[in-house]
Image (cartoon, helix red, strand yellow):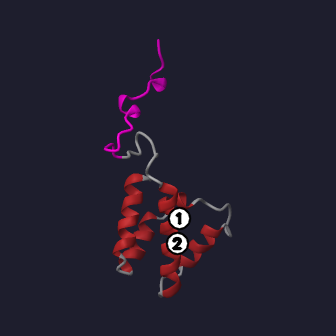
Amino acid sequence: MTCPCKHKPEHADNTSSETKPNRYVSFIGLDCDAKAESLVKRIFSQTEVRAVPPFWEYFKKKAAGELGPRPDSLLLIHSHLNDIRELFELLDDVEGVNLLDQIEQECC
């Protein structure tokens, strides 16, 4: 009897440029870490120049590892999806919302 976990899905060998990256098959091609870093930088830049709720000072400290182990950007975003969405909506940052949606759909 063969183990089904060792069976490669048929579509795993398709390396065609037409194949859309799919997180349920592989994270290859999604570049989740870079997108997450970009989003965190966007949050920092937005919260530097605008008046925002005090939560964002906590978020910055958490991101820097001042409140415990430093989380990677993707975990930080995943942990605060709703807060981040609320921030970008408050600031009318459509690009930020779009990037957050992309990360949520592809990476979380």
Residue occupied by mark 2? 41
Furthest residue in direction left, as rendered: 18
Residue 86 in percent (x, y) is at: 39, 73
Q: Would you say the residues marked 1 and 2 are in contact, meaning their CB atoms lie under 8 Å apart?
A: yes
Rendered residue at 57%/78% (across/down): 57
Q: Is residue 44 visible?
A: yes
Asked if 76 appears above or below 53 in the picture, the reply is above
Q: Secondary structure at mark 1?
A: helix
Residue 15 to residue 54: above or below: above
Checking the image for residue 92, the label placed there is: none
Q: Can residue 79 be spotted in the picture?
A: no
Q: Quadrant of residue 10?
A: top left
Residue identifier under label 1: 37
Please state the extent of the stretch shown in magenta in the rendering: 1-20
Given the current orientation, which residue lies at the most extreme top position?
Answer: 1
Q: Nearer the viewer, residue 24 or 17?
A: 17
| Between 82 and 76, the one nearer to me in the picture | 76
Q: Amino acid at mark 1?
A: Glu
Could you tell me the amino acid type at mark 2? Lys
Classed neighbour count for the residue bearing mark 1: other residues with Cα under 10 Å, few (<14), some (14–19), many (≥20): some
Q: Residue furthest front?
A: 17
Compute the Cα span from label 1 to label 2. 6 Å
Q: Quadrant of residue 102?
A: bottom left
Q: Relative to residue 65, is residue 78 drawn left or right?
A: left
**In the rendered image, the vertical position of residue 19 relative to residue 3, given as above or below:** below
The location of residue 91, given as percent across then percent down, is: 39, 81
Residue at image point 35% right, 67% down: 98
